[in-house]
Image (cartoon, helix red, strand yellow):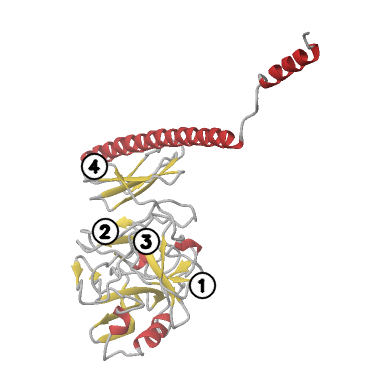
Amino acid sequence: MINKKSILKSKIQNRTSASPRGFTIVELLVVIVVIGILAAITVVSYTGITQRATMATIQSDLTNASQQLKVYQVVNMIYPTAIDCSSTPATNTICLKASPNNTFTYTSDGTTFNLVETNTNSMVYNVTDSTGPTASAIITGSPYIQTITAASCPSTRTQVQDARDSHTYWVQKLADGKCWMLTNLGYAGSGTNTYSDTKTLTNGTGGSTTYTVASYYVTPSTTNFTTEPTAPSISTDGTGQYGYLYNFCGANGGQTGNGACSDVSSVAVNDAISICPKNWRLPTSNGGEFTALNTAINGGSTTTTDAGLIGTPWLAQRGGYWYSAFSNQGSSGYYWSFTQNSATSAYYLKFYSPYVYPADVNYKDSGFAVRCVAV
């Protein structure tokens, strides 16, 4: 006799065993890992494509800009000193515009140029008068010198960069209690005006002396400005990185209405205006900051040695001077103060082995180096 209950039980068991089962934890983990790998591949591929597109755009921008600069040089016998796309561009400038999300930084001494293009994602390329578009170091890490003040000055030697042209410098609070640049200034005017501290300068190299036009002079074959992450010069023998030289007018930022750029001694030079970056100024002399510095790091010596100046920490450079031509490069150092002596002369620091003159006097149309002090 057929047992109906047994048959029904068997059918129920068969139906139950045929029902679909869920995923195990291992299977779920495998699926999640596979999805993650596929997502990562997609993101990497997209990022790579985006970077290549950005790179191609930058290289195209720089190639086109370089061609425009070289055409300008053929026509005018000099490279433009700045890029200016305003409605009333200044003399000897050219309008160059970078693609969206990119910015140009341009420097030129009239005979050479360096054009840097930076993307918002920190991709940096540059082109010069003699090289094509080349990948540059990503400018990260070092703070802008414009953000350093006397109150925030580091007590150890620290690398910073000038937001105007990306030149790098050392800065440090020294034993005299002042925050000094430890590298000679090398600013040729114009540049990026993020901190409203760009100045207009004329390249006077090869020209005649002047005290009425803000001028700089490029020391031959010894200027070695760098951008991060390559460190600036740390020469301890007074040679190597002389920076640019400036007449008194140029060192004081081309300010007018006083003796900075004219033969006036009755109106003091405004120490709040200079060639220095924002929050920095020229030092005082005639018993002022140069004298205090020499006392603090060179033992106050004026007739025995200048070793304390050219050695660590100040690393002074014997960059010589300009007066219708370059002289004394490698043997003597000259640094402007903003302190006037007369209608036609001003105080400066002069040194050579073994003598130091913290308050020497010379004509305003001379070209001397610049070291700035934080305020």
Residue type at mark 3 is Thr
Q: Position of residue 29 (x, y in %)?
A: 56, 37
For residue 300, what is the image quadrant?
bottom left
Q: Dot 2, how many residues are within 10 Å of its Cα: few (below 14), some (14-19), or many (20+)?
A: many
Label 4, on which residue? 73
Q: Which residue is mark 2?
A: 204
Amino acid type, mark 1 = Ala
Instruction: Give neighbour class at mark 4: few <14, some 14-19, many 20+ (Cα, 10 Å).
Output: some
Q: Badge 1 is on which residue?
A: 150
Tell me whether the residue at label 4 lies in contact with that at label 2, contact meaning CB atoms closer than 8 angstroms: no
Q: Nearer the viewer, residue 208 or 139?
A: 139
Which secondary structure, mark 4? helix
The total number of labels drawn is 4
Mark 3 Cα shell of 10 Å, populated few (<14), some (14-19), many (≥20) = many
Residue receiving disc 3: 168
- Amino acid type for the residue under numbered disc 4: Gln
Distance from Cα at disc 2 to Cα at disc 1:
32 Å
